[in-house]
Amino acid sequence: MFDLNLQSTLKKDRDKIISSQELNAIVEKLFNEKAINISNVKRKLDKPNDSYINSLTFDDIETDKIFHISSIKKLCIKYRLRFLDTHLFKGEYPSELYSIIPQLEAKHQTTLENFKIMAPSKLFRLRTKEDPLLFAPIGNGYYYLVHKWGRDLKSYRRFLVWPFKNVNTLIFTSIILSLISTVFGAKIFNNFSDTELFVIFIFNIKTFVFVTFYLLFMMRKNFNESIWNSKYKN
């Protein structure tokens, strides 16, 4: 008989302050404002970019979220990522993003536009010919990191995609593979002379270079340095 129902007690106190009609009106307004925020953010993210540059309040800028295009390009090439307009993005946006952008706009008293995303190619709708980061341009080649979501990229990804960084890295990789295969062959067949091993090594280089370039051509792939900011698939 001495048990206290906290929910009932809170409700009684609330009903003294506000009627159920007024409460319903407040809740409806909150939901409407949230729906408007989501609609506005979706419209901005789906809009093709133009020359608009975002203006942020200096005192409210978090400097650890400012990155130059040269750093973004370097990271994209290293991990074979794309840096493209959000209207090409086909992945899922996290629900918190629809409140983060309005909060950031209110904080800086501005309207954010021209968003870009850094992510793997598979997350974009690319034209035929692991973990997104959303940026907004702030001028002079600098971008402000608005939000990051998803899982982190695996650190070993850079080694898996390194051979496709450019022509030189692909050729170097072919030479290393040729050397390994030649040494492996020498261990199995230890009756080869040095001259024969050298000839085999040269032949292996030509084979690996031909095979890798042929596969790139057949799969219509391009090098990291060429695709990092390209809206085309190949």
Image: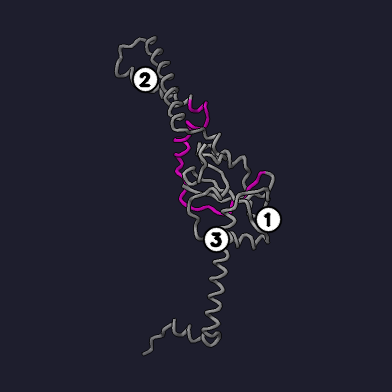
Q: Position of residue 230 (x, y in %)?
A: 56, 39
* Label of residue 183 in the image: 2
Type of residue at label 1?
Answer: Leu
Q: Which residues are magenta?
A: 141-170
Image height check: is 230 above or below 175?
below
Of badges 3 and 1, nearer the viewer stands 3
Residue 215: which quarter of the image?
top left
Image height check: is 18 above or below 218?
below
Q: Secondary structure beneath disc 3?
A: helix
Whole-number angstrom distance, CA of label 3 to CA of label 2: 57 Å
46 falls in the magenta region:
no
Whole-number angstrom distance, CA of label 1 to CA of label 2: 59 Å
**Which residue sits furthest bottom?**
1
- Residue 22 visible from this viewpoint: yes
Residue at the image point whose x is 69% and y is 54% from the top: 55
Q: Secondary structure beneath disc 2?
A: helix
* Label of residue 56 in the image: 1
Q: Position of residue 128 (x, y in %)?
A: 50, 39
Marks 1 and 2, the one that precedes in the sequence: 1
Of badges 3 and 2, nearer the viewer stands 3
* Label of residue 152 in the image: none
Q: Position of residue 10 (x, y in %)?
A: 48, 83
Image height check: is 17 above or below 114?
below
- Residue 64 visible from this viewpoint: no
Q: Quadrant of the N terminus?
A: bottom left
Q: Is residue 166 left or right of residue 207?
A: right
Residue at the image point whose x is 30% and y is 14% from the top: 190
For label 1, the crowd category at 10 Å Cα-Cα, with few meaning under 14, some 14 to 19 and many 20 or more, is: some
Front position in the image: 183 or 141: 141
* Label of residue 98 in the image: 3
